[in-house]
Amino acid sequence: MGGTDIKAALFDASGAMLGLTRVPTPHRGVHTVDAVMQEIAELTAGFAADFPLVQPLAVGLIAPGIVDDDRGIGIHAANLQWADAPFKHLAEKRLGMPASFSHDVRAAGEAEFRLGAALPYRDVAVVVIGTGIAASLFIGGRPHSAGGYAGELGHSIVDPAGELCACGSTGCLETIASAGAIVRRYERATGSKMPGAKEIIERARNGDSEAQSIWNDALDALALSIAQLAAVLAPEAIVIGGGLAQAGDALLVPLRTRVDNLLSFQRLPVVVAASIGENAGLLGAALLARAAAVAAGMRP
């Protein structure tokens, strides 16, 4: 469940993804939660009609914002206008099956940890860089969410004298290194409208000095936040996903060098690209739904 779209899929017993679909997220002010649940019920009914031989045992919901996975509550999502929304309970009551509810980046991290680039590691951060920035943390092979507040890497302060962030703080990582920030900063500096960060990175490669400056600022800020993670949590690896990860070596090679230069005695994390792709969140939601079914005594 995102600010723009709800993306949904049905997974069969073999793990195959069926019927991938998107619908607009309904925004109804204080009634948004009810409208979203109605949309989920309609999507479920559509899957039942299209795939009558697949009988779902559980549902996995994911969303941005502050999410308490253990209680299944959406604590806060400013763009979606909900607070303390009990999605796990609502889904179980509406759909008549066990449910899980998690943060979208933690779900993507679950997929990478169980099936993707984070699989070889027990201490790892999966950092998703897109419109915003967030991390999914695994410590000792276990996810760490701290009641939904862990992993807000995008709101770590990297420049106290920097820009005001939408969260209300100043100098957050998201204001410098998110894909959205890279576009905003370049457009503000040049007056040129850009379709995305990818094009600005390409301009930096081709010698555009303004693009190079903005891209280097983003790399410096990302490296600083990763170095801070290394100093506090000592992850074995940092897995980079999200839209910005599509920059490939243009991101990973200079980022590795910067992180290496910032650290002294600390464990140097391996910095690698995520491997699952744009549907990592959906796959993670399915894995969490399967865990909910097992916890309820079912055998998916």
Image (cartoon, helix red, strand yellow):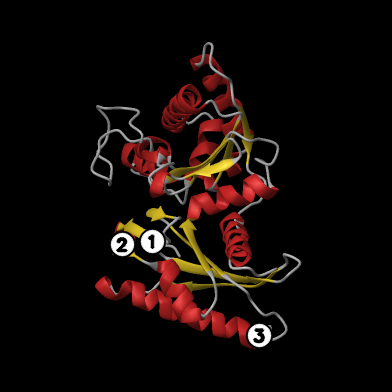
Q: Are marks 2 and 1 in contact (CB under 8 Å)?
A: yes
**Lateral position of residue 116 relative to residue 145, left or right:** right
Mark 3 or mark 1: which comes first in sequence? 3
Report x, y in % for residue 167: 27, 45
Tell me the quarter of the image containing the C terminus: bottom right
Q: Are marks 3 and 1 in contact (CB under 8 Å)?
A: no
Label 2 to label 3, Cα distance in Å? 33 Å
Q: Residue at x 37, y 60 (%)?
A: 74
- Residue type at mark 3 is Asp
Residue 84 is marked as 2
Label 3 to label 1, Cα distance in Å? 30 Å
Q: Is residue 220 visible?
A: no
Mark 2 or mark 1: which comes first in sequence? 1
Report x, y in % for residue 258: 52, 20
Residue at the disc numbered 3? 50
Above or below 178: residue 208: above
Report x, y in % for residue 182: 41, 40
Mark 2 vs mark 3: give the one in front: 2
Residue 10 sits in quarter = bottom right
Label 1: how many residues lie within 10 Å, few (<14), some (14-19) or many (20+)? many
- Residue type at mark 1 is Ile
Above or below 177: residue 40: below
Mark 3 vs mark 1: give the one in front: 1
How many numbered dots are placed on residues in this image?
3
Q: Residue at x 61, y 67 (%)?
A: 293
Label 1, secondary structure: give it.
strand
Residue at the disc numbered 1? 73
Q: Is residue 44 visible?
A: yes
